[in-house]
Image (cartoon, rainbow, N blue to C red):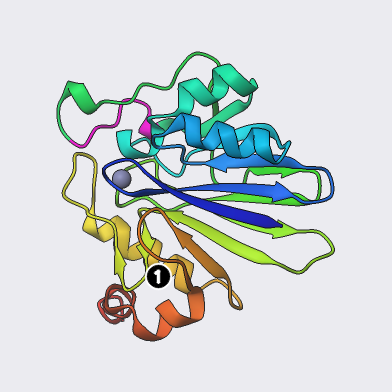
Amino acid sequence: MLIKCFTVGSYETNCYIVTDENTLKCAVIDPGAEAGLLLDYLEDNRLNCQCVLLTHGHFDHTGAVEELREETGAALYMHRADDGVTIGGDYYRYRAPEGTLFYKEGDVIRLDSLSFTVLETPGHTPGSVTLLCTQEGSGERALFTGDTMFRGSCGRTDFPGGSIEQMYASLRRLAALKGDYEVYPGHMDATSLDRERRTNMFVLDAQRSYR
Ligand SMILES: [Zn+2]
């Protein structure tokens, strides 16, 4: 799988474009802003964008969704619990547009050799998900954690609908996955699940507080 990261907008959101390199079909995860930049990449590499996958509905992860859909005709997936989510007030509220496909725990979005499995990981928002991506034949495995798990940190839980208890349960859940994964968070640098298991104070605290 080919993973390209664009850090977009004033909130420096990581948008990931994940491509099956054999068929050039791709998924765009969290197109938060700068649609032109994303569309140029698709066009320059002759990529066929099949779907837009949202880790959650905050405006800094969704700002370029409509332009991308209009230009590519891609299907849009998000969790229903984030329809109407906001960081505060109506101005920032995100409403799932017409035609949105709502995914939930255990759903699998297939894109040729790529599979994206939906793990519900609430806490930052009620409808936050982590997308577990594997590729048939390559053994590559990646987690797109949105604003749930960051390198050395985790997402804020003080926005409307946030919950520290749910966040800790979600971090425990991710830490309990078998084996190692590349971790691609919604902000800041990529990491690995093993590194976060060993060094992320929030993950460690989540496990401690549970014992
Ligand atoms: Zn967020």
Mark 1 Cβ inside 8 Å of ligand 1: no
Q: Give the quarter of the image for residue 39.
A: top right
Tell me what residue is drawn at x 70 percent, y 41 percent: 45
Tell me where residue 171 appears, x and y as whole percent.
Answer: 38, 66
Residue 83 lies within the magenta run: yes
Q: Does the image show residue 200?
A: yes
Asked if 199 appears above or below 108 in the picture, the reply is below
Residue topped by disc 1: 172
Decide: is 149 above or below 200. above
The quadrant where ligand 1 appears is top left
Q: Residue at x 28, y 73 (%)?
A: 202
**Place of residue 40 in the rendered image (x, y in percent of width and height, measured from the top left):** 58, 34
Given the current orientation, which residue lies at the most extreme front position?
44
Give the mark count.
Answer: 1
Position of residue 68 in the picture relative to residue 43 (left or right): left
The answer to whether one can see residue 130 in this image is: no
Seen from the viewer's position, the closer of residues 210 and 136 is: 136
Q: In the displayed structure, would residue 13 be above or below residue 177?
A: above
Quadrant placement of the C terminus:
bottom left
- Front residue of 10/126: it is 10
Query: Picture coordinates of residue 72 (x, y %)?
Result: 63, 23
- Residue pictured at 48% horizontal, 30% vertical: 36
Please report the residue visible at 34 percent of the width from the left and 74 percent of the height from the top: 203
The span shown in magenta is 81-87
Q: What amino acid is found at the position of numbered circle 1 in the picture?
A: Arg
* Snapshot quadrant of residue 198: bottom left
Considering the image in quadrants, where does the N terminus appear? bottom right
Residue reaching furthest bottom? 198
* Label 1 Cα crowd, 10 Å radius (few <14 / some 14-19 / many 20+): many
